[in-house]
Amino acid sequence: MNKKLNILFGVGSIIAGYVAYNVIPNLFYRRGYTFHEMDMLSIIAHRGGAGLGEENTLSCIERGIEAGADVVEVDVHMTSDGEVVVCHDDSIDRTTNGMGRIIDLTLEQVQSFRVVDNAGNPTSEHIPTLAEVVNAVAGKCKLLIEIKHEHGRYDIERKVVEIIHDAGISDSVAVQSFSDESLDELHRLDGTLRLEKLVFFGVKGLPKIFDGGFSTFDYAKYTHVSSFNFYYRSLTRRMVDALHSHGKQVKIWTLAGPEDTPHLPVDGIITDRPDLWRSNRNKALLKRRRK
């Protein structure tokens, strides 16, 4: 019993320490950005711009682009017959009128179901392939692909790299993941590909980050990573400055409008509402032209 209590106390202390160091200071940062700062931020449409339509669908992605996103972000999984499809979850249960894990379904089976709206009503949309998304985005904005890593299954990394090469979009695409193994495999397949590391939070006083599990953090370990993308409530200005000093960019996820965003000197905003951010950026441009 004492051992269990000690473990619980230790876990509680870690959580309390994390909250005290990261979350509480974040609450007191001023919200929003100046027009000039807004102009410097990269606007990334999360799941295509999930606040504008059914997430990760072609119509939603088109709305994200029309809203002025600099980058469209999508999530990918692999079907049982080796096709890469764009869906956040590892199953189609939540987002379509079908059921099943994507890894257990063929592409034909996945696309036989319709994406549902917020009320659960089927739409005309199906879950698109990554190739379909690449064609929709090409020449309009950049693309950020998130690999939902399944331990021990590296075919998806190879397929994603093949799709990028076949489309000739290497200079306008980046791939992100929580998984170090996935990022390492991508780097092995293409040493020039831009890679970004997803992080929930860092641990004060320890060389650790939480990315779904606790991973060792060392800049030498992440030489092939260009940007660290943090959950927005877990980041401090000190952490941003440290990452910048090592030549890394920093993005935060997932935001709604600028007025709710803690003021941090980051490089990009991953948001469900790129339209709100673009509107503020347009105000910045208009103000500068009037001077």
Image: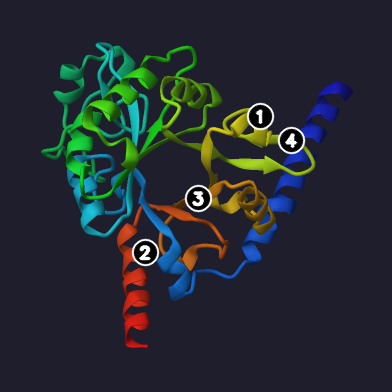
Q: Quadrant of residue 91?
A: top left
Q: Position of residue 281 (x, y in %)?
A: 36, 69
The single residue placed furthest to the right in the displayed view is 2
* Residue position for label 3: 251
**Residue kind at label 4, given as amino acid type:** Pro
CA gap between label 4 and label 3 equals 20 Å
* Residue position for label 1: 214
Q: Which residue shows up at 34% across the image and 57% down it?
A: 273
Q: Earlier in the sequence, mark 4 or mark 3?
A: 4
Image quarter (top left, top right, bottom left or bottom right) of the C terminus: bottom left
Tell me: 228 left or right of 280. Answer: right
Q: Earlier in the sequence, mark 1 or mark 2?
A: 1
Image quarter (top left, top right, bottom left or bottom right) of the N terminus: top right
* Residue position for label 4: 207
Which of 135/23 is in front? 135
Q: Which residue shows up at 62% across the image and 53% down it?
A: 240
Q: Which residue shows up at 63% across the image and 29% down it?
A: 221
The single residue placed furthest to the bottom in the displayed view is 291
Which of 110/121 is in front? 110
User: Can residue 157 be seen?
Assistant: yes
Q: Position of residue 104 (x, y in %)?
A: 30, 12
**Is 162 placed above or below 67 here?**
above
Q: Which mark's residue is nearer the viewer, 3 or 2? A: 3
* Residue position for label 2: 277
Q: Which residue shows up at 82% across the image and 35% down it?
A: 9
Q: What SS does tag 3 mark?
A: strand
Q: Earlier in the sequence, mark 4 or mark 1?
A: 4
Q: Position of residue 127 (x, y in %)?
A: 21, 31
Which of 60/264 is in front? 264
Tell me: 195 left or right of 221. Answer: left
